[in-house]
Amino acid sequence: MKKLRILSLALAGALCVSMLAGCGSSDQGTANTPAAGGETTPAGTETGSTATGAAFKLGGTGPLTGGAAIYGLAAQRGAQIAVDEINAEGGDIQFELRYEDDVHVAETAVNAYNTLKEWGMQISLGSVTSTPGIATSVLNYEDRIFALTPSASSPDVIEGKDNVFQMCFSDPNQGLASAQYIYEQGLGEKVFIIWKNDDVYSTGIKDQFVAEAEALGLEVVGDATFTEDTQNDFTVQVSQAQQAGADLIFLPIYYQPASLILSQAAATGYTPKFFGVDGMDGILTMDGFDASLAEGVMLLTPFNADAEDEATQNFVAKYQELYNETPNQFAADAYDCVYAYKLALETAGCTPDMSAEEICDALIEVFPTITLTGLTGDGAGITWDSTGAVSKSPKGMVIQNGAYVGMD
Amino acid sequence: MKKLRQMKRSTRSRVFTYALVIVAFVVIQLLRTFKDGGVGSVLEGQLIPICAYIVMALALNLVVGISGELSLGHAGFMSIGAFAGSAFAIALQGSVTLSPLRLALAMVFGAIVAAVLGFLISVPVLRLNGDYLAIVTLAFGEIIKSIVTNIYLAVDGRGLHFSFLNDTIELADGGVELIKGPMGVMNTQRISSFVAGFVLVLIALTVIFNLVNSRTGRAIMAARDNRIAAESVGISVTKYKMIAFVVSAALAGAAGTLYGLSQTTFVATKFDFNTSILILVFVVLGGLGNMWGSVIAAAALTILPEALRQFSELRMLVYAIVLILVMIATNNPTIRGFFGRIGDKFRRRAPEEKGGAVQ
């Protein structure tokens, strides 16, 4: 009896402590920041030392846990590498980066955004994925905090908001480019589409692809859908494609379901060509996936980790050293975002003691005028128009011997 | 004080619940108006969702705690309320300019749509019992999610346009898209307010307490406690369970509208099985049939994940551990006895002191 009482007290005590610990964070968020940054980033010590008010507070939300974590983590890591490089150089522009988890849910993204706002975020990296991106971009617009999202590609993210910009090309553009690419290169006669109908990204690309294919005279022999709950088995969709006599399957989806489609098609002995978009990026580094199945898969992506130029090779080497994997385009986009900010802030002459609103006004002026030579710009440079859309061209890649190779 | 002690146990619990909600509201409102920076932007952003989740928990408690049926699809009703209510509010944006009125109309509309669906689903479902009912409601929630994900709804000068699976709507100039399939709803105006949330919580409490303390409520509980005995005295079990279920669906619909109109965007997949379970967790944690428990549990468990942000990726693990500890702590007879004894001591001492002070 006595033992039980002690146990009960211990449990209640543990509870109280954890509750108090929870409360503590919201009360003194700013004081905790350098330590919190240190926990999540290996290079956190550098970040911590610059947190003296002389750095721009850069915040972003992304799925750091859960099903879409690979995108959020990649973006966070890419941005962190850029921030560390810039801070190590020790110029006028210094950054303090903080990423908060939004688990790819709009409501959590709003909470994460508010956490960052309480922290004193001056410029924002928006959200990594589209649905949370739409929610946080509205708040960015209302609070006058400038946002440049690395990868929230839905056109709704930037529509009607003068201070929200994108680093990635938009969903419809990807659909358009894919259809044109397949048609021009003569990659397939009969196209079958497998798309995810509860996903903004997938639906956006597919709609534009179908419209453009019709205009070009590219034959779409059918399409099949799946949802979040039914993405564990694709035998039906694959056999539909086979029955329709498709010689090319277009996959405007993320790489996890795509990997299943590839292996299930291979298991039935059906070998059409597969064509993906930027969500396919990451398939080679996926745990438990036989990369040889992805041989010959084509995809459109703005970033090629095997590119010869020095900047890309440096970035890839650093990323591999820190995280033991090859960076995907999300990491590269986030890396470019930070450098775009550096360039824009230098051009506009902003200083870290300016308020978020002043910086916002200055950046709105400057962003359409700058040209960034980034990792994802294909040498030609990246520019923005005043609506916030980016102009850069997607690269066609094909997977050969477990690596991306440029198609043209 | 004496009066409070003489009250029936259920009345005391009711007074306590109202007092709890009103005091919490007043404190938060005072902080928001007078303190610099208010309650902080994180909590500020969560206030309306917390109200919505509280109403959801109360609604589900009516089904699970009072009527004794396990529903695993309550997020479906929330979804219906959120989509119907938001679409209604956006459509009315031009004609009803007063936003609180528009919000109230939208909530009523959301509640009615959810109630109608609740009625339709309850006709076949409430003839089932226990596990069967749980599974059918689970399926219902999934069906709602799949259907809503594929609905495209828009309005323009020529009227309402609807399409399913593919967006085939061609809008005239000045038309507005209300529901955009997998992209869900994008609210141009967020008209939900904390005050409206508070009022909705009070309405939900009033409805539930009045229902429980009426003849109908006693019949519902009789049917829960012993179906055969209740039928033998002439209570139509299906009818009374249906009343509880439909009222619960209507409240869930109104909560959904409140939630939907507080978000800039929301998608149908948000209201999935996990959300249903989350609401069930609120109810179970707060205690079956215990309304103030649901209020506290819903508020605490909505804030908790955000309060745990400092644990970064271990956040949800810590959340789960806290949940387990709370469940053990509140259900362990030793701990209950311990707090019970403290309560007894306090109660025994209090009248003496009180008496002394008066003399």
Image: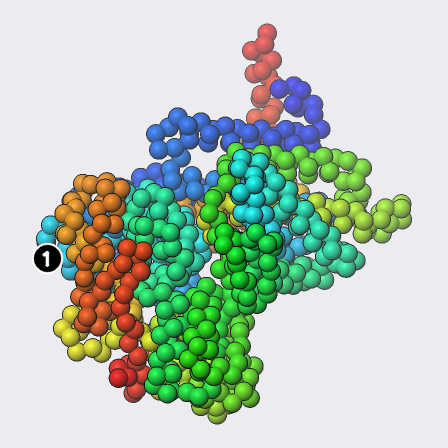
- Residue at 43% from the left image edge and 58% from the top image edge: A131
Q: Is residue B122 above or below residue B332?
A: below
Q: Depth check: A20 or A171 in front?
A: A171
Q: Position of residue A375 (x, y in %)?
A: 21, 69
Left or right: B116 with respect to A170? right
The residue where tag 1 is placed is: A89
Q: Position of residue A273 (x, y in %)?
A: 41, 87
Q: Is residue A100 visible?
A: no
Q: Is residue B245 above or below residue A189?
A: above
Crowding around mark 1 (Cα neighbors within 10 Å: few <14, some 14 to 19, many 20+) is few
Q: Chain of mark 1?
A: A
Quadrant of residue A253 within the rendered picture: bottom left
Q: Quadrant of the N terminus of chain A?
A: top right
- Residue at 60% from the left image edge and 42% from the top image edge: B107
Q: Depth check: A150 or B12 in front?
A: A150
Q: Depth check: B317 or B75 in front?
A: B75
Quadrant of residue A367 within the rendered picture: bottom left
Q: Quadrant of the C terminus of chain A?
A: bottom left
Q: Position of residue A218 (x, y in %)?
A: 44, 83
Q: Is residue A344 visible?
A: yes
Left or right: B228 with respect to B22? right
- Residue at 39% from the left image edge and 49% from the top image edge: A138
